[in-house]
Amino acid sequence: MISFLRHGIATASESAKRHRWFYEALFWAAIVLAALLFPSQHLLMIEISIIALFALSLDLLLGYAGVVSLGHAAFFGFGAYLAGLLALHGIVREPVLAMLLTGLISGLIGLAASTLVLRGSDLTKIMVTLGLALVFYEIANRLTWLTGGADGMTGIEIAPLLGLFEFDFFGHIGLAYCLVVLFLLFIVARCVVDSPFGWSIKAIRDNPTRASAIGVPTHRRLMAMFALSAAYAGIAGALLTQTTSFVSLSVLHFERSADVLLMLLLGGTGYLYGGLVGAVIFKLLHSWIASLTPEYWQFWIGAFLVAIVLLRRASIRSALASIGERFRPAGHAQGRAR
Amino acid sequence: MLTILFDGVAYGMVLFILSCGLAVTLGLMNFINLAHGAFAMAGGYFAFLLATRYGVSFFATIPLVFILTAGLGLIIERTLYSHLYGSSHLEQVLFTVGLVLMSIVIADYFMGAQPVSIPLPEILRGQIEIGGVGLGRYRLFLILVCGLLTLGVQLVISNSRFGRQLRAAVDNASVARGVGIRVNRLFALTFAFGCGLAGIGGALGAEIMNIEPTFPFKYMIYFLVIVAVGGTTSLTGPFLAAMLLGIADVARKYYAPSIGTFTIYVLMIATLLVRPNGLLARRS
């Protein structure tokens, strides 16, 4: 009986996997096609791929580890400034190497920060992440000699990519670079969440007490996931610096942390594509609203947040009601959907 | 030195009035309301409009502001917030961040980006000398009014039937429901009351804190610090936290204005590291 069940589950997931590969290939092909079809929009696409990577980094933390962060811009901004400093002072000239180094150091910072964040309740986590982002913002604002303060960091010269490809004004090379990085990091993220490590993370998200009862070192696993997420965010920041040759305080602003949460809300969490889809929707929405009411787009972003949360609640509730109608004796549906 | 302490206490008092509503709603419904500052800002603008457009005297504006802001809070609670009780913290955060963004733009649209100031009556201007120390009259007035409000709130919570029901619901909402307390109605009333107090805080604090469109975001962190550090199990914790924050912030502005506000965030993080559930948290 049990072996039959296992077989059934295995074939079901097998066929789902095969279909998944097809749709995933389609998704990435569509991105490449879009890049080839609209060469005049490459700068916009660079922006989208960077915020998509940033949203992916938060999805790893929020969608898989279940840690709510209201200050993820801290690591994005850290990466942006670090990449700027590396290029400005000629410490590491080659962009790919500088990007990797930035990711590594951001990950270490994330590891250190995780010891502060991963305590107490959700409220404490939200507070500490928000506080960290504000501290980073203030530091960048005050250390004018290092970061340029409110004027931003200017005069950054980015060396040719791999010593071969010069970054151009139209963003052709930049887009290729960002998309390749996004794709590779996406593959890495997929491998991580499908690994035993990823499954244990999901187990912790669903029920930390049970996870630790079956021997998962919850705290250490969450720290590792936090560090990975911070590294991804740092790399996204580095890409922004390298493609724009400029860093401003806006990389650390609270709005950036709020925007990335909105992207995940639009795209959905916990299946990795949510951040990517959400980033595209968000950017298109953003430029559409900004063209209608340039001063008040913030209002509409806020209204979207409110509306989406309320609609989601309503749809979950009606779904629950219909499930309850159909499987009244089953009784566990309500508990699960919570 | 004494002046700093005095100003700090006055500031702390205002901060407490501003955030005690948040502490109660958070403790009662476990609802993370980042938009609490929007109600304080609304209170500030109501006071400004009443005083300048309608010529209401300063002392009369305070109860009016309380009623207006509490009414606004009640409407928004019934129409929007009540759908989100028991939803995940993430959803609550996103929802209230959305409200903050909207309130910022609404305030900007109707009132302009410049901070507004509420004209003070003659009697509250200037200083008086007590024992050789010059004390601002307005600061003294703040301490007096906020102290009375604090006492009133404390009395209501500890002695009235409403307060007893409230404390029971904070301790254990499901048991409170079980014994027939209408927790949802209780929460709506508490929410409105908390908003009203925040409105008073905004009106009184306009002299110390600029009432401007970015107010809800600027002071969000202050309210959250007070609630997170003070804990939500009693009002004594947030009160102490508000005092500490007020005095520390005034002292920082006086002695080391260049350090910037991040000393507060560092203090908050440090406190939360030692006591993740607040200063006076009960051990579970």
Image: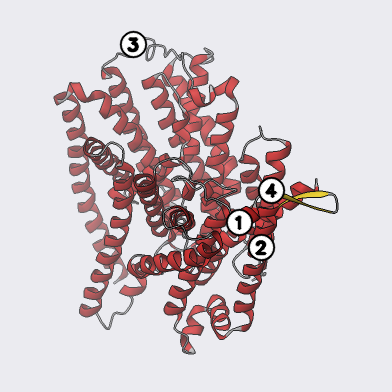
Quadrant of res B49: bottom left
Nearest to the eye among marks 2 and 4: give it: 4
- The Cα atoms of the two marked residues, 1 and 3, are separated by 54 Å
The x, y position of residue B185, in whole percent, is 42, 79
- Which residue is at a point 60% across and 40% down the rendered structure image? A112
Q: CA distance from mark 2 to mark 4?
A: 28 Å
The residue indicated by pointer 1 is B15
Residue A267 spot, x, y in % from top left: 28, 48
Q: Are marks 4 and 1 in contact (CB under 8 Å)?
A: no
Q: Which image quadrant: the N terminus of chain B?
A: top right
Asked if the residues shown at circle 4 and circle 3 are in contact, with their CB atoms under 8 angstroms apart, the answer is: no
Residue at 66% of width from left, 59% of height from top? B141
Secondary element under disc 2, as helix, strand or loop, is helix
Can you tell which mark lies on residue B239?
2
Which one is in front, B153 or A29?
B153
Q: Disc 4 designates what residue?
A: B126
Which disc is residue A195 wearing? none
C-alpha span from label 4 to label 1: 22 Å
